[in-house]
Each structure stands twice: as C-alpha cells, then as structure tokens.
Image (cartoon, rainbow, N blue to C red):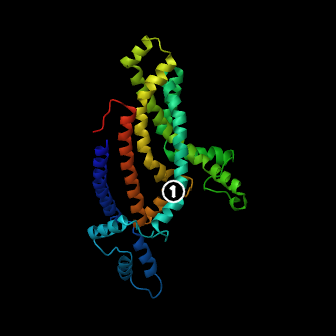
Amino acid sequence: MKKYIIKRLLWSVVILFIVAFLLYVLMRSLPTSYLEQIARQKSQQPGSKSFEEWMQQLQATYGMDKGIVPGFFSWLGKAARGDFGDSWKYTVPVTQKFADCVAISFWMSLVVMILEMLISIPLGIIAATRQYSMTDNVISVIALAGISLPTFFTASLLKLAFAVKLRWFDLSGLTGRNHDFLSPAGQRWDIAMHMVLPILTLLIASIGSYMRYIRTNMLEVLNSDYIRTARAKGLSERRVIYHHAFRNTLITLVTIWGTSLPALFSGTMITEQLFSIPGIGYISYQAMIAGDIPFSMFYLVFIAVLTLIGNLLTDILYAVVDPRVRIA
C-alpha cells in the first residue's frame, strides 16, 4: 500500500506539471485579455500614450513580456513558494480572494452531497427491489427528468414558482435588502433562505444520476449467485438487501464520493451565475472572462490537484470496501 501511494503521488506530480503547463498555454492564448482592456481604456484618455505603448508597459509590469515557456516557469517557481500573485480583476492576493468566497460554495455543495445520498440511496434501492413496478417506473421517470433538464431551465422554473408566484424567496443574491439590520442569527437565517433555490437546483440536476447508478448496480448484485444462496439459506429479505447486496453497491458509491471531492471546492459556475451567488464558481467565471490569468491559473490548478487526490482516495477506498481488490 505504501509503495503504491508513493508511486501514485510521483505520477500525480508529473501529471500536474503537464496539466499546469497546458492550462498556462490556454490562458495565454485566450482572445480576452485583461491587459488589452486596460490599455484600450487608458489610450482613449485625452493626451494619453498609444495603445501599443500602454500594452508594452502593462506587459512588463505584469510579467507578460516573456514568452509562454519562460513565463510558465516563472509562474511555477513563484507558485512552488506559495506566491500565486495578485488577481488582476480583484486587485487582492489570489489566495485571499479564494479564501473569501470558497466557503460559500463548499457549504452549498456539502449540503447538496448529503441530501443526494439521503434521497438517492433509499430510492435507488426501492426501485431495484421493485423492478418494473409502478414505484420503479415513477422513480425512473423522476431520475430521467432530473438528468435531462438543463440547469438553467430548472433554475428558471424554481424562480418562477417560488420567487415570482409564491414570493417565498428572493430571485437572486446571497442576502436580502435588510440583511445589515438583522441580528447575527437573523443574518445566518437570511443567507440560508437565499441558498434554498440554488441547492434545490443542484439537487434536481444531480440526484437522478445517483439513483440510476444505485438502481443499476443493485439489480446486478441482486441477480448474483451468492444472493440466491443467501435467500436459499432462509435469510430475511431485509438482511439480504442491506447486509449483502448493498455492501457490494458501495463500490459504486466510493467512485462517486471520490470524484465529488473537487466539486466541494470548485463551486458550480452555472448555478452561481443564475442566482448571483458570490461563490468560487461565480468569482472564477468572472475572472476568466476578464482574462485574469493569476486567479484563473490558481483556480484551475487547484481543481486539478483535488481531482488527482480524489482519484487516489477512490483507489484506496476500493481496497477497503472490496476485499477482492488488492493494491500492490
């Protein structure tokens, strides 16, 4: 196990280096440049220097006067020391801006993940144990609807129903108009109420795939020989399903949990944009369309690191939940 982890970590460093280089090349090749926008604004001022002169000055100031390869190694050297620079758009250190907004996305994603498990696991098991029944058909239709509906469509329906018609929630934003006048407990409740519709949107969009995964794997396990043997021994159906069948379905859940690690910190760009939630997804999207290379590089490399860690944890957990798997 120890040798395997060390080998995977070494390979992860190589993969991360390649990914970081490709991301840097893509960011330097974007058609949108923050420096070009600033240079264009300054060059239009009366008596100002030309656009080309401003571009040369700004490129030298922000370290963009180097080629892609020298620029990447310059960025990599600073990143290795924990210096990711200042955000061009937000004019604060990248790590500070990230820390200010990542908590919103983390708690929202964590609530969604917990609700997904609490709802999808029982429904997936019920659908599998009652295959082709009315209950199974209803659950399958709900799952397919959640998978098929685009996020923006689901968000629009929820806004129309609960914000426009019923007026239970605000259309967008993280806080209400009277947030500053509320008590600390009231402010927390205000934020929680503004998170309801985004969480419902994410839950509807993702719960269907979870139910389908669990149903499909449970059906495969329930048709196995050892399940028939357990039933032939006279074990109760409840024990057969939850003690024998469901334990083998955990392998699928381990894969889901491992791949969900980046989602806890990466935010949800589309949903946060639709509801104007200032989480890491919303902030990162704004930085990318503005051509903010320092912040975009940090965000994308951070997600790559979490993805590699999630895959490693998935492989290790495989060996824990499935005795047949051995890691050498």
| 98, 164: nearer the viewer | 98
Quadrant occupied by the C terminus: top left
Image location of residue 50, percent across then percent down? 39, 83
Q: How many labels does the image show?
A: 1
Question: Which residue is farthest bottom?
Answer: 47
Give left or right: position of 42 versus 325: right
Question: Which quarter of the picture shows residue 294?
Answer: bottom left
Name the residue type under label 1.
Val
- The residue shown at (48%, 49%) is 264
- The residue shown at (42%, 59%) is 299
| 50, 287: nearer the viewer | 287
- The residue shown at (64%, 57%) is 175
Question: Which residue is farthest front?
Answer: 2
Whether residue 154 appears in this view of the structure is no
Q: What residue is disc 1 on?
A: 102
Quadrant occupied by the N terminus: top left
Image location of residue 233, percent across then percent down? 43, 11
Give left or right: position of 52 versus 197: left
Image location of residue 191, percent across then percent down? 63, 53
Question: Which quarter of the picture shows residue 221?
Answer: top left
- The residue shown at (53%, 61%) is 100
Residue 65 sits above or below residue 126 on the image:
below
Residue 91 sits above or below residue 116 on the image:
below
Q: What element carries label 1?
A: helix
Whether residue 269 appears in this view of the structure is yes
Residue 190 sits above or below residue 216 on the image:
below
| 149, 252: nearer the viewer | 252
